[in-house]
Image (cartoon, rainbow, N blue to C red):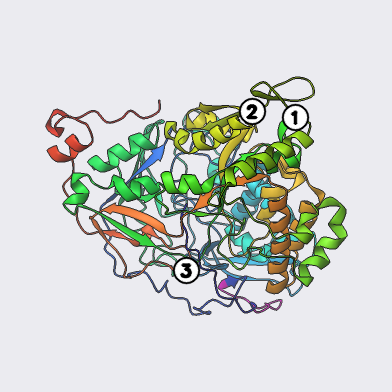
C-alpha cells in the first residue's frame, strides 16, 4: 500500500443542514469545493473518448457473483462496500475530497440538526441494467438485506434502527441515538440491489437466494455488466451502453473503457511475469520496493512500451503489520505481544530488502492529523482518565516509539528486553525452546498466500527463533486463506487496516468486542477491550471535527500500547507502472491519488514480442507460450 505521508490541512467545520433543507452533496470535514453546483470532478477530461479494453490481473480464484454473504469468494469487479463496478450507491464518494459524497441514485438528502435521521430523495432517472426503475422499496430491501448478511454493513449501520418510505421517491433512515454526525453521510454508501431480481426465479427454475454464493450473472445498476467468464479463471465486464448515470456529474469523464478483463493468477510472481510479457495486465500498483528498484529491466520497459510514475495522495498510510490473533492463549498477554514487537528489526529489512525506500509505520492513522504523537493532550486525558484502570499505564507517561535497530548494540538490548517480558509472562527457556508452565513449546505459524512472502517473514522468524520461539510459514490459496481468516483460524497474518480522514462507524468493525466474534469481521486481532470499545463510541459521537481528532488520538494510543499488531512499513508514494496505451488527465485526484477510471485507451501497444517472451522465460509467442496457470 502506498499513500502520501503529508497530513491534510486542518479543515473547517462542515455546515449543519437544517431539517427540510435539501442538498446534493454531503460533507463531514469541510464544505465541498464544488458547493451545490457540482458539474464534474475538476481533474477529469470531460471529452475522454470511450472505447478499448482495460486488462487487469487478480489473485487466486473466484466462485461467486454475490459479495455480501460471508461464504464464497467474489469475482473481481464486485465489492461489499461501494458496490464495485456493477452496483451504484445512493451517493458517490468523492475521489478528490475527503469525507465528501455527491448525488448518484439519490439526487438529494436532508437531515435534522440533531442527526437523528436522514432522508434521501431518489433520482427519477435511476435505473437497473434491465431497465427497471430503482425504487424506495429497492433501497429499503437492500438496507435490511445487506445489514443482515454482511458483518461490515452490520457494524457500519448498527445504529440505524430502520428505513421507511416517507414520500413517493423518499426514504428515511432512523437512528437509535442523536449526535452521530457521520451516519447521515455514510448512509449514502448503501449499495442498492434489485429486489425484483433477487426475489425472482433463476434459469434453473429455483428461487434466487441472496444468502448464498452464485455464478448467475446479476442485474446491476452500475457502469459495467458481466459479458463473459470462465469460473475461477477470468471474467470480462462490458460497459453498459445505456447506463442511466453516464452523464451524471460524478460519472462524467470516467468509466471510459468498453471492456474490463480480469485474468486470475495463482500468485504475485505469476502475475508479474505475465505483466512483463504483456496482454494480461495493462497497469499495476507496485507494492515491492525490490521490484520497483531493480525489476523494471525487461524489454518492454527498456524500449518505452511500459512506463513508471510515482504519485502522492492526502489519505495517509494504512497500518500494515503482523496481526497477532489474541483469541489464541499465547497472544493474550500484552507482555508477549510487546516482546514480539521488540524482536522485529525493521531497519535491517529496509536496508537489505527494501533499498531504504520504506518508512516505519507508527500509527493506525499514519501521515494524517489523526495520528497520535508525544503525550496525551488535555482533551485526550479527559477521555482517558475515566478508563485509566483499563489502559496500559505507559499511555499516560511515555510517548509511543518502536525499536530502532540502527543504534549500537540495539539487537542485544531489544532481544534481552523481549526475553525478560516473555519470562515475566510465564515462558521459560528449556534448551533451545521457549516453553510455558505446562512444558508446551511456543510455536507460531505465519499464514500467507504468496510463496514470496517468506522473503519478509523469514527475517522476523529468525529473530523469534533466537528467543526460543519455533516458527513456520503456511502458504495456502486465496480461497483457503479467506476461509481461515474469516473464521479466525490462524496465529499471525499480515493485514492492512486502511482508514479514512473521517473515521466513524466502521471503527466498530475494526476494533470492538462484538466484532471479535463475528466471522468475516475486520477485527482480525480479536480485540476485546472495554477501553477500546468506549473510545470507539467517543469517535463515532464526536460533536465536531476537533473532538473527533482528539478522540482518534486517544484511540490510536490505546491500540498502539496494547501491541495487537507488530507494525511493518509504508511507502510514502503510490508507485504505478503501465503499458503506454492510456491517455490520462493532466492530474490525478489529490485525495486518493489514483483514479484509473479517469484514464482512456489512446491505442494498443505491441506485446508478446520475442524479446518479451524471452525475458519472461517463455518460448517465442508464435508458438503460443504457456501462461502461468491460474488457480483451479
Q: Which residue is mark 3?
A: 96
Q: Residue furthest front?
A: 408
Q: Earlier in the sequence, mark 1 or mark 2?
A: 1
Tell me if label 3 and label 2 are in contact, CB under 8 Å: no
Are the residues flagged by discs 1 and 2 in contact, CB closer than 8 Å?
Answer: yes
SS assignment at label 1 = loop
- What crowding class fits label 3: few (fewer than 14 Cα within 10 Å), some (14-19), or many (20 or more)? many
Q: Quadrant of residue 265?
A: top left
Determine whether the residue tagged by mark 2 lies in a helix, strand or loop.
loop
Q: Residues within 10 Å of mark 1 (few under 14, many from 20)?
A: many
* Nearer-the-camera pick, 480 or 215: 480
Q: CA distance from mark 1 to mark 3?
A: 51 Å
Q: Which residues are magenta?
A: 15-25
Observer-nearest of 593 and 602: 593
Left or right of 488 in this view: 270: left
Q: Which quarter shows the C terminus?
A: top left
Instruction: Find residue 184 and report its image quarter.
Output: bottom right
For label 3, the SS is loop
Residue at figure coordinates x 68%, y 44% from the top left: 564
Residue 522's x, y, as percent? 63, 44
Residue 302 in magenta stretch? no
Pointer 1: what residue?
427
Residue at 16% in and 29% down: 619
**What residue would you read off at disc 2?**
468
Mark 1 vs mark 3: in front: 1
* For residue 625, side relative to residue 180 (left or right): left
CA gap, disc 1 to disc 2? 10 Å
Q: Quadrant of residue 555?
A: bottom right
Amino acid at each position: 500500500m502506498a499513500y502520501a505521508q503529508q497530513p491534510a490541512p486542518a479543515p473547517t467545520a462542515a455546515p449543519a443542514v437544517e431539517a427540510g433543507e435539501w442538498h446534493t452533496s454531503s460533507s463531514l470535514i469541510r464544505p465541498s469545493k464544488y458547493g451545490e453546483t457540482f458539474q464534474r470532478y475538476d481533474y477529469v477530461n470531460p471529452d475522454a473518448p470511450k472505447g478499448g479494453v482495460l486488462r487487469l490481473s487478480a489473485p487466486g480464484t473466484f466462485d461467486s457473483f454475490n459479495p455480501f454473504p460471508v461464504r464464497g469468494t467474489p469475482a473481481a469487479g464486485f465489492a461489499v462496500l461501494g458496490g464495485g463496478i456493477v452496483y451504484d450507491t445512493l451517493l458517490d464518494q468523492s475521489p478528490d475530497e475527503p469525507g465528501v459524497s455527491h448525488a448518484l441514485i439519490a439526487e438529494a438528502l436532508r437531515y435534522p440538526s440533531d442527526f437523528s435521521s436522514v432522508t434521501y430523495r431518489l433520482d427519477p432517472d435511476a435505473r437497473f441494467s434491465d431497465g427497471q426503475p430503482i425504487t424506495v422499496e429497492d433501497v429499503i430491501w437492500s438496507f435490511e438485506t445487506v445489514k443482515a448478511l454482511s458483518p461490515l454493513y452490520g457494524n457500519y449501520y448498527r445504529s440505524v434502527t430502520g428505513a421507511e418510505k416517507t414520500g413517493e421517491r423518499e426514504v428515511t433512515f432512523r437512528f437509535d441515538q442523536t449526535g452521530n454526525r457521520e451516519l447521515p453521510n455514510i448512509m449514502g454508501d448503501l449499495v442498492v440491489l434489485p429486489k425484483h431480481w433477487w426475489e425472482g426465479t433463476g434459469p434453473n427454475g429455483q428461487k434466487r437466494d441472496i444468502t448464498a454464493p452464485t455464478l448467475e450473472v446479476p442485474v446491476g445498476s452500475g457502469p459495467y455488466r458481466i459479458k463473459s467468464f470462465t469460473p475461477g479463471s477470468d471474467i470480462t465486464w462490458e460497459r453498459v451502453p445505456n447506463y442511466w448515470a453516464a452523464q451524471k456529474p460524478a460519472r462524467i469523464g470516467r468509466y471510459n473503457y468498453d471492456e474490463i478483463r480480469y485474468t486470475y493468477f495463482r500468485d504475485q510472481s505469476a502475475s508479474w511475469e505475465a505483466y512483463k510479457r504483456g496482454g494480461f495486465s495493462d497497469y499495476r500498483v507496485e507494492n515491492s520496493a525490490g521490484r520497483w528498484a531493480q525489476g523494471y529491466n525487461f524489454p518492454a520497459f527498456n524500449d518505452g512500451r511500459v512506463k513508471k510514475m510515482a504519485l502522492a495522495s492526502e489519505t495517509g498510510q494504512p497500518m500494515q503489520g503482523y496481526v497477532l490473533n489474541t483469541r489464541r492463549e499465547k497472544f493474550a498477554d500484552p507482555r508477549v505481544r510487546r516482546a514480539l514487537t521488540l524482536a522485529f528489526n525493521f531497519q535491517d529489512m529496509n536496508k537489505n530488502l527494501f533499498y531504504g525506500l520504506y518508512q516505519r509505520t507508527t500509527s493506525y492513522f499514519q501521515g494524517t492529523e489523526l495520528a497520535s504523537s508525544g503525550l496525551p493532550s488535555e482533551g485526550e486525558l479527559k477521555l482517558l482518565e475515566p478508563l485509566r484502570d483499563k489502559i496500559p499505564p505507559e499511555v499516560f507517561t511515555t510517548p509511543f516509539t518502536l525499536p530502532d535497530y540502527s543504534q549500537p548494540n540495539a539487537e542485544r538490548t531489544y532481544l534481552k528486553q523481549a526475553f525478560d517480558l516473555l519470562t515475566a509472562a510465564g515462558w521459560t527457556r528449556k534448551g533451545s525452546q521457549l516453553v510455558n508452565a505446562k512444558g508446551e513449546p511456543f510455536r507460531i505459524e505465519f499464514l500467507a498466500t504468496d510463496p514470496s512472502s517468506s522473503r519478509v517473514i523469514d527475517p522476523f522468524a529468525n529473530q523469534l527463533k533466537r528467543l526460543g520461539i519455533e516458527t513456520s510459514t503456511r502458504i495456502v490459496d486465496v480461497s483457503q486463506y479467506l476461509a481461515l481468516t474469516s473464521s479466525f483460524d490462524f496465529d499471525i497474518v499480515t493485514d492492512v487496516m486502511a482508514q479514512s480522514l473521517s473515521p466513524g462507524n466502521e471503527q466498530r468493525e475494526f476494533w470492538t468486542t462484538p466484532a471479535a466474534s463475528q466471522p468475516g469481521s475486520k477485527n482480525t486481532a480479536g480485540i476485546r477491550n472495554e477501553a477500546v470499545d468506549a473510545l470507539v463510541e467517543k469517535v463515532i459521537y464526536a460533536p465536531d471535527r476537533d473532538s473527533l481528532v482528539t478522540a482518534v488520538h486517544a484511540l490510536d494510543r490505546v491500540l498502539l500500547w496494547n501491541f495487537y499488531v507488530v507494525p511493518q512499513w509504508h511507502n510514502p508514494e503510490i508507485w504505478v507502472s503501465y503499458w503506454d496505451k492510456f491517455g490520462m488527465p493532466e492530474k490525478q485526484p489529490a485525495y486518493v491519488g489514483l483514479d484509473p477510471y479517469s484514464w482512456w485507451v489512446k491505442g494498443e501497444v505491441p506485446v508478446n514480442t520475442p524479446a518479451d517472451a524471452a525475458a519472461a522465460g517463455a518460448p517465442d509467442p508464435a508458438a503460443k507460450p504457456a501462461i502461468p496457470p491460474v488457480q483451479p
